[in-house]
């Protein structure tokens, strides 16, 4: 069941960036980023800086894209499951750490424009840190799922193999909750992680909730292994029984 905060539907119509900003109550810093200073031409410059995440990639992931040019087209990375690894944008791994590198403001803006969203360049200064923070939170919950299966072993933890944004394809659990009268998620991601040779598919549903007493929005991630493999079924069953 969903928490009470995720049960109240939203009635207002907003742009893509307004919706994302209102749904997520946190960014990568305790204060919102200052407004970008306009360039001499009067246009807001889009930053090309890319933040390195805390999320390690697998050595078998195909990420030759080091992005010397923020506008260069990204490659299409195929997962072992035969689906595109990232329907949003594959942005590669950091050469020094092997961790996923998040897209820059410029890359994010151009990706959203290609997908037809009514996004604004001025919003990228806020939206990109939100995007990064959401992924960090999802990874934290995945590590909690994975911890019982790596503790006391030689495995150094899970790594992200591939990922996909499937906002138009509702998960079975989300569809059932919607039929029961709960609010539909506003986004869905599917991640494939590698646990030292064992691949596990995860689905992540993103829900918006009602503002709290201070007027701040609430936000809920439903992260769980998919039931498309014995490993996923086992993990869900053991956690449900309180054994993992």
Image (cartoon, helix red, strand yellow):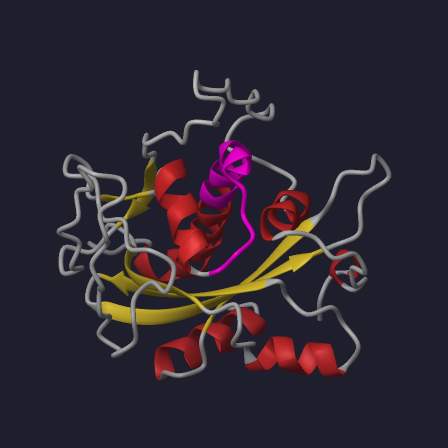
Q: Which residues are magenta?
A: 116-132
**Secondary structure that dominates the magenta span:** helix
Q: Is residue 11 left or right of residue 105?
A: right
Q: Count up the numbered dots.
A: 0
Question: Does the magenta-highlighted stretch encompass residue 78?
Answer: no
Q: Residue at x 41, y 76 (%)?
A: 232
Q: Quadrant of residue 241?
A: bottom right
Quadrant (top left, top right, bottom left, bottom right) of the N terminus: bottom right
State the image coordinates of residue 101 (x, y, percent, origin top left): 29, 42
> How far from the left and from the top, in percent, is residue 153?
24, 56
Is residue 80 placed above or below 150 in the rendered structure?
A: below
Query: Please, is residue 33 above or below residue 144 in the view?
Result: above
In this picture, residue 1 sits left or right of residue 202:
right
Where residue 148 sits: x, y (%)? 40, 60
Q: Residue at x 57, y 73 (%)?
A: 240
Q: Outermost residue, front direction?
A: 41
Q: Of all residues shown, which one is farthest toward the right? A: 213
Q: Is residue 205 above or below residue 38?
A: below
Tell me, yes or no, if residue 76 can be seen here: yes
Rendering quarter of residue 212: top right
Please report the residue visible at 50 percent of the width from the left and 17 percent of the height from the top: 37
| Residue located 50% across and 67% down the image | 224
**Left-right relation of 44 to 151:** right
Relative to 76, 141 lies left or right = right
Residue 225 in percent (x, y) is at: 45, 71
Comparing 11 with 30, the one in front is 11
* Quarter of the image where one finds residue 69: top left
Residue 143 visible to an observer of this rendering? no
Q: Is residue 128 magenta?
A: yes
Q: Nearer the viewer, residue 105 or 153?
A: 105
């Amino acid at each position: 069941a969903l928490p009470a905060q995720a049960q109240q539907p939203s009635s207002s119509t907003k742009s893509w960036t307004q919706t994302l900003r209102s749904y997520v109550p946190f960014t990568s810093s305790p204060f919102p980023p200052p407004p970008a200073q306009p360039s001499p031409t009067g246009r807001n410059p889009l930053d090309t800086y890319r933040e390195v995440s805390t999320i390690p990639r697998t050595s078998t992931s195909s990420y030759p894209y080091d992005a010397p040019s923020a506008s260069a087209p990204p490659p299409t990375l195929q997962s072992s499951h035969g689906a595109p690894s990232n329907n949003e944008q594959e942005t590669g791994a950091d050469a020094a750490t092997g961790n996923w590198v998040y897209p820059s403001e410029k890359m994010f803006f151009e990706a959203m424009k290609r997908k037809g969203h009514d996004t604004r360049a001025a919003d990228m200064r806020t939206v990109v840190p939100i995007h990064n923070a959401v992924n960090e939170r999802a990874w934290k919950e995945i590590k909690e799922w994975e911890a019982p299966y790596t503790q006391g072993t030689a495995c150094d933890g899970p790594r992200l193999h591939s990922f996909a944004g499937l906002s138009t394809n509702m998960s079975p659990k989300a569809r059932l909750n919607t039929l029961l009268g709960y609010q539909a998620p506003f986004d869905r991601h599917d991640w494939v992680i590698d646990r030292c040779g064992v691949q596990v598919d995860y689905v992540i549903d993103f829900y918006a909730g009602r503002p709290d007493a201070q007027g701040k929005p609430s936000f809920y991630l439903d992260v769980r292994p998919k039931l498309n493999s014995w490993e996923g079924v086992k993990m869900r069953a053991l956690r449900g029984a309180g054994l993992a």
